[in-house]
Each structure stands twice: as C-alpha cells, then as structure tokens.
Image (tube, grey):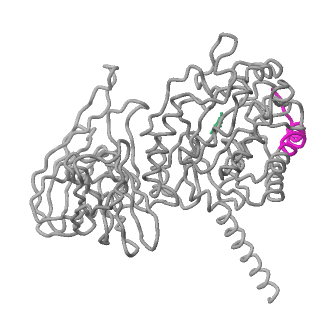
C-alpha cells in the first residue's frame, strides 16, 4: 500500500515537474510575442521563375519551385552560383529584426528542397559543394545574434525532403513507393545527424521549428522517430523549444508551443503557448513576381490580435540571393518597429483577457501586470468619429486612463456605468496605425464576461455570438466567397436565446429584429424583457440574388422594426427571444438591435 502510494506520489511529482519545466522553457518565448521568420535558400536564387517559366502551381510559394517545376538536384544546386557572397551579411537581418522590435529569429536551415544552409558533413547538398565562394551562413548569423542579444532558432524540414531518395514528397509524385525501412534510412542518415550538427555547432539554439502540417499518424513518420528527435534535442540543448509541427499535439509535454496553419490568426483565447507563422507577402521565399504585400496595418493588427488571445506572431521575410530585402519588407518592418517603440509595452510580456474575442468593433485589447498595476490596453484600430470609445466588460473603475503615446500621461476623461465605460477621446488619433489607450487599475479588474458589448456610436446587437447559452451554433448560408448573408442561429419552437445587457440610463429604446424565414407562413415569436413581453410575427422573408449570377438565389435576411421598449431602470436586464409556433421551417435568427 505504502509502495503504491509512493509510486503515485512519484508519478504526480514527475507530471508536475515536467509541466513546470515546459512552462519555464517557453516563458521567454511567450513574453517575446513577436519574432522574425526568414525563408532563404537556393529557391531565393530562382526567384519564383525557372528557365523562363514561372512557378507552375497556383499556390506560388517560391520555395516550392524545385518540386513544382520538377527540377533535378543537380540543376537546382547550380542556383548556388547566383548568390552574391560579397554582399551577403546576416548581421543586417539581425539589425533589421531588432529595429522591427522582433525578439527572436527562425531561419530555414533546411527547407523541403533538402539543401543545407550550413557546412554540413552529412551528404553533399549544401552551399560549399556548389559554390566555393560560399560561407557558413548559419555560423555568421549565430555570431550576429549573439552580438545583438537576439535569440536564434532553426527551421528544419524533417518530413518532406525532395533531395534524398527516401525523403517524403508532397503527394508521392516523385517516387511512388516508399517503405518504412527506406524512410527510416533517410531519418537515420540525414535528419538525426544534421540535427545533431545544428544543435552542436551553433551555440544556443532557442527553438527548432519543424514543419509537418498533419498529425504524424497520417504520415509515414512514426512516433518513435519523433521521440528520437525529442531525446536528441533534450540531450544536446535542454532549453531548446520544439513546435507542434513536429507532428505531435500540444498536449504532449515535449511540445513547447503550438504552430497554427500558415497565416492563420488566432480566433480563441488559449492558455497554452501558440503562434501564427505569417508571411509579409504571399510567398515565403523571395519571389520576383510578388505583388501581394500585406499592409503595415494588417500586420500590426495580426500581431495585436494574437497577443489579445495570448498568442505570438512570427513574421516571415524572404531576402534575395544577395541578402537584401525588398523595399516593401523594409518599410513594413520599420513602420512596425516605430509603432512598437511607442506601444511595445502593450505587446511585450502582455497577453489577453478572457472576454469574448470578437466583441469590439473598434479593435482589440491586451493586458499586462506591471509595477504593481494591472493594465488593460485598448488597441484602437478604428478611432471613433464621435470621439467616444465604448468599452464593455470591466466592472472595476480604472485609477488612471491615458494614451500610451502620451509621455505626460494626460488623463482621458471617462464615465463608467456598470460594465460600460465611455472614454472621451481627442478628435485625432495619435498614431497613423493603431492608437493605444491605457486603463490602469490598482487591483485586479473584475470582468463581466457575459454582458453584451456596446457598438461604436452606441447601440447593442444581440446575436448568437453573445447569447448567454454557451453552445450556440453559428451558421453561415453563403457559398464560399459570396458574402450575401450574415451569421445566424437556427431556432425552432421551444428554443430560446437569452442575453444580458446593461442600460446606462432609463429611456425608451428602439428594437428591431433581423432574421430569415424561408417558409411561406408567418411564425409567432416573443421577446421578453424582464417580465414584459412583446409578441412578434416573423414574416416570410423571400430570396436575394447572389450576384453576379442572376439565376442563383439565397435567403434574404430582413430587419423588422419592433417599436419601443421601456428601460425603466439603470442596470442589468435580461432579454429573451423565443419561437412560440411550431414552424414548418426553422427560423434563421441573425440579431436584435437595441438603440
Ligand atoms: C508550409 C510550406 C512552407 C513554408 C511553411 C511556413 O509548410 O510548405 O513552404 O515554409 O509553411 O509556415
């Protein structure tokens, strides 16, 4: 019995310890929030064009050209001759990252093309075998990172390798059959020894970034091969972080952070460490025909969105084969850096609050405890024309409100009623991109996670996304890409939706309801505000043409005014909507608008 108990205790301690160790390992990374991703390799020399023909695949990722345009190892290797070594200087990348406010760099040590950026002793697919003038770029980058106190990590394509005869390729188009034994030969003779080199010869490796976009069970890669990688990393560099694209889920204690899909921004608040890899344009590697640059505002909003949900953003750039960056990249990085110089306090070491992620139509919020204060940063993407910023969801009164850009911290006047805070802002926004308002609290602010938020210019929309029922299923009618109808909730007899809202003053408010009734008959419903009832008739709503195809119709959502409701008390109110009739078809409920 005693033995059993001590074994149990040991297991418990081990679990706790490994959990804690994981947390400690990734702490710096969580705080860092913003990193640089660099895609640079032989493909940078091809620039998305091969023998007068552009990249063959619509996805047009320049770093995939070897595969998409079916280039042999030898011919592709010759691209090394295009590299302008006298101009290549990785320290410039580090300086650029610093200026942008980035806290770490991840570079493609080996991408899917199988070509190593460093002087590998494993095989002959690396610069030194194709261009005698070349140098070990990873050694230079590691030295520059050390000099500038920048963390460095390596992208390593473990699963896909188009050079090795037994490496995986996308749809098994290059070689049809690959046995487990053959794949393991690739693993043992290339992956493991190359990772050993990377983890031995370049100083501290802050993270390894693997790239498998499926769970390993769906691939040829076996769990024991992944475990072998993990043990190697832990043996050589215990502090090195490993991402989920290794092929294991984040719930695995050896996965330090989750990597979402390419350019996939966060949508929900998550406690575990996670990131979006996002690229500054469309392609990851340099592409001569690129014209899909994201704007600085888009990039800043992506970073802020992720931080507000407790995530990271790793922004990719693709330098040319002479090491230079296109002006579009430089200007965006510098704009972001200037923004972070002023507003970095709301990003670095900050996270989010567990309020509904999409409820503010003016922007996002981030949160941080700093110098004994709790600070909520309102990240205003859209400065209010009526000079009133409406923020719903915090009950505690802030002790100080000011603009982060204002060194003098001149107080911003505000009025608070329950969970509704109105900030009276200056007419002009202090920042051309995103302006930040700081709410400072002496104590931990009390949140109201249920109340429906006010919209800009006033008014509250009650919909499936802010109903009190947590399991509301939001639907969308549109065929992909045809934005003609809103998100809605299917609702039939007996079903109801409830909301909590806060009235700032006693007054009559106008209500309207928007829905689609695809049937032929009107359906009875009711709205209840406390013990007052309003019966409503939900009329058939007809069809709308989905342009540009004039023969294609979908359901129309119509707004019906419902008259006035009397909010006779300041404070919280509950609103209920339900269907009374047994409808022949379900009602597609969009929202109730109260103003
Ligand atoms: C995908 C692509 C790759 C790119 C990566 C970045 O996995 O295959 O080219 O490196 O995403 O997230």
Extreme residue toward the top, this view: 52
- Picture layout, residue 503 above or below residue 298: below
Q: Quadrant of ligand 1?
A: top right
Asked if residue 428 is among those painted magenta in the image, a careful observer would answer no
Q: Main secondary structure of the magenta part?
A: helix
Up-down: is 399 above or below 593? below
Labels in figure, total? 0
Q: Residue at x 72, y 68 (%)?
A: 18
Choose top left, top right, bottom left or bottom right for residue 588. Answer: top left
Residue 482 as seen in the image, left or right of residue 204? left
Residue at 70% in and 67% down: 21
Q: Quadrant of the N terminus?
A: bottom right
User: In this orientation, which residue lies closer to the viewer: 237 or 81?
Assistant: 81
Residue 296: x and y, percent?
Answer: 45, 38
**Closest to the observer, 566 or 213:** 213
Residue 570: image location, x then y, percent = 16, 69
Residue 192 is one of the magenta-drawn residues: yes
Residue 218 is at least partly visible in this image: no
Query: In terms of depth relative to the viewer, which is nearer, 233 or 12?
Result: 233
Residue 344 location in percent, x, y?
47, 54
Q: Which residues are magenta?
A: 176-194
Which residue occupies 25% across, 46% down? 428
- Give the residue at the far bottom of this rendering: 2
Image position, residue 241 (x, y; %): 70, 55
Mark yes or no: residue 341 visible.
Answer: yes
């Amino acid at each position: 019995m005693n033995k059993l108990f001590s074994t149990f205790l040991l297991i418990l301690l081990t679990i706790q310890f490994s959990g804690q160790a994981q947390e400690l390992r990734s702490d710096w990374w969580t705080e860092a929030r913003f990193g640089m991703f660099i895609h640079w390799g032989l493909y940078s020399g091809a620039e998305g064009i091969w023998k007068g023909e552009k990249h063959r695949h619509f996805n047009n990722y320049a770093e995939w050209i070897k595969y998409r345009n079916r280039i042999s190892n030898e011919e592709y290797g010759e691209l090394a001759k295009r590299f302008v070594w006298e101009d290549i200087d990785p320290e410039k990348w580090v300086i650029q990252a610093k200026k942008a406010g980035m806290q770490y760099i991840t570079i493609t040590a080996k991408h899917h093309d199988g070509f190593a950026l460093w002087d590998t002793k494993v095989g002959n697919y690396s610069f030194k075998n194709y261009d005698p003038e070349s140098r070990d770029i990873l050694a230079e980058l590691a030295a520059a990172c050390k000099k500038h106190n920048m963390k460095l990590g390596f992208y390593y394509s473990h699963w896909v390798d188009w050079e090795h005869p037994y490496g995986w390729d996308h749809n098994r188009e290059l070689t049809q059959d690959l046995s487990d034994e053959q794949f393991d030969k690739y693993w043992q003779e290339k992956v493991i020894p190359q990772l050993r080199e990377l983890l031995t010869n370049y100083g501290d490796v802050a993270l390894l970034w693997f790239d498998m976009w499926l769970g390993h069970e769906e691939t040829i890669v076996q769990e024991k091969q992944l475990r072998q990688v993990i043990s190697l990393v832990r043996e050589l560099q215990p502090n090195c972080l490993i991402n989920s694209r290794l092929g294991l889920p984040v719930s695995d204690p050896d996965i330090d952070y989750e990597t979402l899909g390419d350019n996939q921004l966060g949508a929900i608040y998550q406690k575990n460490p996670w990131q979006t890899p996002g690229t500054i344009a469309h392609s990851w590697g340099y592409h001569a025909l690129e014209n899909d640059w994201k704007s600085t505002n888009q990039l800043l909003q992506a970073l802020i969105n992720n931080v507000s949900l407790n995530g990271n953003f790793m922004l990719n750039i693709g330098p040319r084969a002479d090491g230079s960056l296109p002006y579009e990249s430089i200007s965006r990085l510098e704009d972001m850096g200037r923004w972070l110089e002023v507003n970095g306090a709301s990003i670095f070491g900050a996270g989010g609050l567990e309020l509904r992620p999409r409820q503010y139509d003016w922007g996002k919020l981030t949160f941080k405890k700093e110098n004994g204060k709790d600070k909520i940063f309102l990240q205003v993407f859209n400065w209010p024309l009526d000079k009133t910023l409406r923020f719903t969801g915090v009950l505690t009164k802030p002790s100080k409100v000011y603009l982060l850009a204002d060194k003098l911290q001149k107080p911003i006047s505000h009025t608070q009623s329950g969970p509704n805070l109105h900030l009276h802002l200056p007419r002009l926004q202090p920042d051309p991109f995103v302006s930040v308002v700081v709410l400072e609290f002496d104590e931990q602010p009390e949140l109201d996670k249920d109340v429906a938020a006010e919209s800009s210019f006033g008014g509250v929309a009650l919909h499936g996304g802010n109903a009190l029922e947590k399991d509301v299923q939001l639907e969308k009618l549109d065929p992909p890409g045809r934005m003609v109808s809103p998100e809605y909730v299917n609702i039939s007899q007996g079903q109801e939706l409830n909301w909590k809202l806060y009235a700032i003053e006693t007054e009559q408010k106008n209500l309207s309801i928007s829905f689609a009734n695809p049937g032929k008959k009107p359906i009875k419903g009711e709205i209840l505000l406390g013990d007052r009832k309003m019966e409503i008739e939900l009329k058939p709503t007809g069809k709308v043409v989905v342009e540009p195809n004039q023969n294609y119709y979908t359901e129309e959502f119509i707004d019906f005014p419902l008259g006035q409701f009397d909010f006779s008390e300041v404070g919280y109110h509950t609103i209920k909507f339900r269907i009374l009739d047994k409808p022949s078809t379900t009602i597609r409920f969009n929202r109730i608008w109260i103003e």
